[in-house]
Image (cartoon, rainbow, N blue to C red):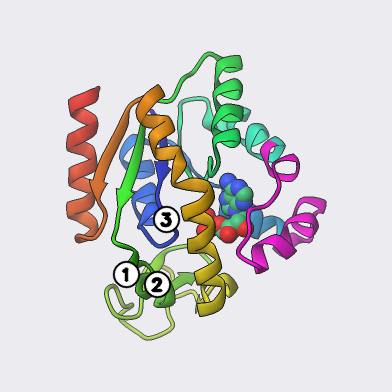
């Protein structure tokens, strides 16, 4: 199963990517997680990406695309992947087509999360992530049982630096300008599945699995 998840920041891609990865036994490949990990470890990729990420801007293709290709060609992804956060531009979508063409494994479906812009700021502002296992929470809509602690592993919850209000606004503008045009591109070239992203996580997941069944 090779899926691409498309949607604005805060649309629920990360949450659904984790559920889909468990369902189909394939890894969740998040370009944002890959970059944050590189920043934390201060690798050359992280050093080049950090400033763009802090400003809510896209990391240039010559910095990121090679790292994504390396990940997708790795053994872990040989049975498929749930790709979250990549591609974000038409040039990246074309690069992805080329990479997958080389290994002879096309995308099965592109899932687009439709969420009203007014809900996104609220969702991003309340988002919290577990530092140990990466589980996602929301202070109002999906709070942990004990404030600041992960229900699954007791790890500390943190707020991403780029989930602060000013950077959120920049990221949403970048999405509208550079990523939203991808919807029409995928509508023209492939299987675009649109799901209503605002509901409960399990009902959004159910809708995705149903719609995937319809195109499989
Ligand atoms: P995310 O976790 O997907 O919201 O990504 C966090 C940040 O990482 C973004 O605001 C960008 O700075 C960078 N990033 C993630 N994916 C990409 C991508 N496909 N292209 C360029 N920059 C990216």
Q: Could you tell me which secondary element the residue under label 2 belongs to? A: helix
**Cα distance in 3D space between marks 3 and 1:** 12 Å
Mark 3 crowd level (few <14, some 14–19, many ≥20, 10 Å Cα):
many
Residue 42 left/right relative to 79: right
Q: To which residue does mark 3 refer?
A: 8
Q: Which residues are magenta?
A: 40-65
Residue at image location 54% in from the left, 57% down from the top: 174
- Where does the N terminus fall, quadrant-wise? top left
- Near mark 2 (Cα within 10 A), the count class, few <14, some 14-19 or many ≥20, is some
Q: Residue at 40% x, 62% y: name it.
A: 10
Task: Tell me where residue 53 appears, x and y as whole percent.
Answer: 65, 62
Q: Is residue 65 above or below residue 96?
A: below
What x and y, as percent, mark residue 83? 48, 40
Using residue 186 as the reference point, say whether residue 213 is left or right of it: left
Earlier residue among tags 3 and 1: 3
Reading the image, the residue beneath label 2 is: 121
User: Of label 3 and label 2, which has the lower sequence position?
Assistant: 3
Q: Front-most of 107 and 145?
A: 107
Q: At 55% across and 67% down in the image, what residue appears?
A: 170
Residue 64 magenta-highlighted: yes
Element on which disc 3 rests = loop
Quadrant occupied by the C terminus? top left
Tell me, yes or no, whether the highlighted magenta stretch contains residue 140: no
Q: Nearer the viewer, residue 27 or 61?
A: 61
On the question of residue 151 being in view, the answer is no
> Is the CB atom of the residue marked by disc 1 within 8 angstroms of ligand 1's nearest atom?
no
What secondary structure is found at the residue carrying circle 1?
helix
Quadrant of the image occupied by residue 139: bottom left
Observer-nearest of 150 and 187: 187
Asked whether the beta carbons under mark 1 and mark 2 sit within 8 Å of each other, the answer is yes
């Amino acid at each position: 199963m090779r899926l691409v998840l498309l949607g604005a920041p805060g649309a629920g891609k990360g949450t659904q990517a984790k559920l889909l990865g468990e369902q189909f036994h394939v890894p969740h490949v998040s370009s944002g997680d890959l970059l944050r990990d590189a920043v934390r470890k201060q690798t050359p990729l992280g050093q080049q990406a950090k400033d763009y990420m802090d400003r809510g801007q896209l990391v240039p293709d010559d910095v990121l695309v090679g790292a994504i290709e390396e990940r997708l060609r790795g053994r872990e992804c040989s049975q498929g992947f749930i790709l979250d956060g990549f591609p974000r531009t038409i040039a990246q979508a074309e690069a992805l087509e080329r990479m997958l063409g080389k290994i002879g494994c096309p995308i099965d479906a592109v899932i687009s999360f439709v969420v009203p812009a007014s809900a996104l700021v609220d969702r991003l502002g309340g988002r919290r992530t577990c530092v140990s296992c990466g589980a996602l929470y929301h202070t109002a809509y999906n709070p942990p049982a004990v404030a600041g602690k992960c229900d699954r592993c007791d790890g500390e919850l943190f707020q991403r630096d780029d989930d602060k209000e000013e950077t959120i606004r920049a990221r949403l503008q970048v999405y509208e300008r550079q990523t939203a045009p991808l919807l029409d591109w995928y509508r023209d070239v492939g299987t675009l599945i649109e799901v209503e992203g605002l509901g409960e996580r399990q009902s959004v997941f159910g809708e995705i699995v149903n719609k995937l069944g319809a195109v499989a």
